[in-house]
Amino acid sequence: MSGLLNTTAPYGPSLAAKAVLDLASYVSIAVSLLGLALSVSLLLSIWVTRAHKHKTQSPLLCPAPASIQIDKTIVSILAVITVYSVLILIENVLWIVDWSLLHSVPILSLAGYALVFSLFSLNIQLAFDRQYLVNVAYHSAHFPNVFQVAVFVVSRKSLRIFCLYGVPLVLYCFYIASFALSIPQNWLFLPFSTPESSSKSVNCLFLIGMSYFPIAATITCCIYVYTYTITMQSLHMQLTDIAADRETGLPTASSSAIMKGASLKRAVILRCLLMSIGLIVFYVPTIAGVFTRVFDYDKDAAYPDENLWLWFWLNVLPAFDCIWTPILVLWFQEQYREDFFNNLSMLIYPEP
């Protein structure tokens, strides 16, 4: 048992390392505050608008179920990003005030990973929602579906919930075990921490939990590649049918209308693709750093002085998702954007 609990002392950073990591924390605090303000404002706008529509809108004007599901997923992502912004703020303030305080609040380690797990899971959900929307729009039952198992899963609520949220929860339990056996943690990669232990058992438990991130990123990318393939194949088939009908003199649909519809569907894919790119750009480098840290653990250099500016960027990148996600929602969700600016104008210029 003593071998399993073999941990290293929480050696602090040198003055040079502390200065660079403090600078990263100041940048992260500024970005998280901006993101928090924007996310909270956007969520309040959505809530006010829905409350107003609930009182005035006829039940016969309810949007399509697929659209409702996408809206639920986007709002859930915004809610998680809001809490995540608060966590980024707390962790970086604690680091600046006294880095050793982070070791006395181990719940922050688990909370950070829980929120990022949720973000990745919700982005898979969003990818499936968009894929279903495009499938329905293009009647893609004519195409071979390489995700037959996935489609079977997401069409059944209990299986969908288990695969999208149950599997991550199981892998998250490995985090709990690894951190329970390794106190304190290393905070070189805020907001992520790693077990400060040379025990293979502890590090293996941690790496099993970490395996969720590459799996989730791969699934999300595959769904979008498949959805894009459906869109292009359907467009090609429709244009081929138009050409054939014209040769035979049969009435045909307008090619411009088909091209316009295809453009709208590609825009739908682009919206979700950019949200997923945020996960890759803002998290994958830092997660890769966490992987290398666990595989190449140096007990005598908990906060190494080499590659300080690399550590700077790996600390800063995850914080930028706090502002990236709400900006994308405002940019691409036209209804949310209109409601947000309408509510903002009414707040600044209230009606007499």
Image (tube, grey):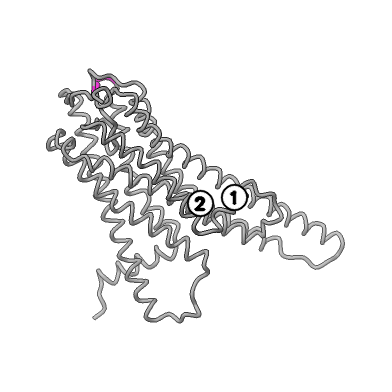
Q: Residues within 10 Å of mark 2 (few under 14, many from 20)?
A: many
Which residue is at 43% across, 35% downward? 211
Depth check: give the residue in front, 42 or 59. Answer: 59
Identify the mark at residue 66; answer none if there is no mark.
none
Quadrant in which residue 155 is drawn: bottom right
Q: Earlier in the sequence, mark 2 or mark 1?
A: 2
The boundaries of the magenta stretch are 302-306
Q: Is residue 97 magenta?
A: no
Amino acid type indicated by mark 2: Ala
Reading the image, the residue beneath label 2 is 127
Say if mark 2 contacts mark 1, CB within 8 Å: yes
> Please, what is the three-letter code of the amino acid marked with disc 1?
Thr
Q: Percent from the top left, x then y, of residue 8?
A: 21, 23
- Per the rendering, the mark at residue 227 is 1
Mark 2 lies on a secondary structure that is helix
Horizontal and vertical percent position of residue 194: 29, 32
Instruction: Report the predominant secondary structure element of the magenta stretch.
Output: loop
Q: Quadrant of residue 265?
A: bottom right
Name the element at disc 1. Answer: helix
Across and down, in percent, residue 140 comes to: 67, 56
**292 left or right of 130 in image:** left
Q: Is residue 225 visible?
A: yes
Quarter in which the C terminus is drawn: bottom left
Furthest residue toward right: 248
Name the one closer to the observer, 271 or 93: 93
* Distance Cα–Cα, label 2 vs label 1: 9 Å
| Residue for point 31% across, 34% down | 178
**Residue 27, percent from left and from top:** 24, 40
Considering only vertical position in the picture, is 44 above or below 204?
A: below
